């Protein structure tokens, strides 16, 4: 099995965990696991041409997450929890992708 398939399966696993964690409390260690899983997915899945769209999508998720907090009574706490868990998952990938991009920019000069 190649690394691309593994990365795809890990991303799907992260999605499943974020949805389950919207209904069941996974605790701080579960959230840390989601973050680490996001780092692994970021390493395996995001290539050079995907860096900017991925980071832009992460910023958009942060904005959505912050606005849904105010709408929790309408959307329900589970929807807010799922989105917050997904943000935690994607943040791990965003961290590693941003660090790789900064390193790439600074080492090429």
Image (cartoon, grey):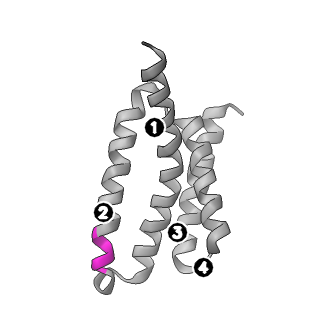
The residue to which callout 4 is attached is 25
Q: Is residue 107 above or below residue 82?
A: above
User: In the rendered image of this protein, does residue 76 appear above or below residue 41?
Assistant: below
Residue 65: percent from left, percent from top? 35, 66
What residue did someone put label 3 on?
A: 19
Q: Residues within 10 Å of mark 3 (few under 14, many from 20)?
A: some
Element under label 1? helix
| Residue lying at 42% horizontally and 66% vertically, measured from the top left | 83
Foreground of the two, 10 or 80: 80
Residue topped by disc 1: 98
What whole-number distance in Å separates the C-alpha atoms at marks 3 and 1?
A: 26 Å
Q: Which residue is mark 2?
A: 64
Q: Earlier in the sequence, mark 1 or mark 2?
A: 2
Q: CA distance from mark 1 to mark 2?
A: 20 Å
Q: Which element carries disc 4, helix, strand or loop?
A: loop
Left or right, residue 19 beside residue 9: left
Q: Nearer the viewer, mark 3 or mark 4?
A: 4
Label 3 residue SS: helix
């Amino acid at each position: 099995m190649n690394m691309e398939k593994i990365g795809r399966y890990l991303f799907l696993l992260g999605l499943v965990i974020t949805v389950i964690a919207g209904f069941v409390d996974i605790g701080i260690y579960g959230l840390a696991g989601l973050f680490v899983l996001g780092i692994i997915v970021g390493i395996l899945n995001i290539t050079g041409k995907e860096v900017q769209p991925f980071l832009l999508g992460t910023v958009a998720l942060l904005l959505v997450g912050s606005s849904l907090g105010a709408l929790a009574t309408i959307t329900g706490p589970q929807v807010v929890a799922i989105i917050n868990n997904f943000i935690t998952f994607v943040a791990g990938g965003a961290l590693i992708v941003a660090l790789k991009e900064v390193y790439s920019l600074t080492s090429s000069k």
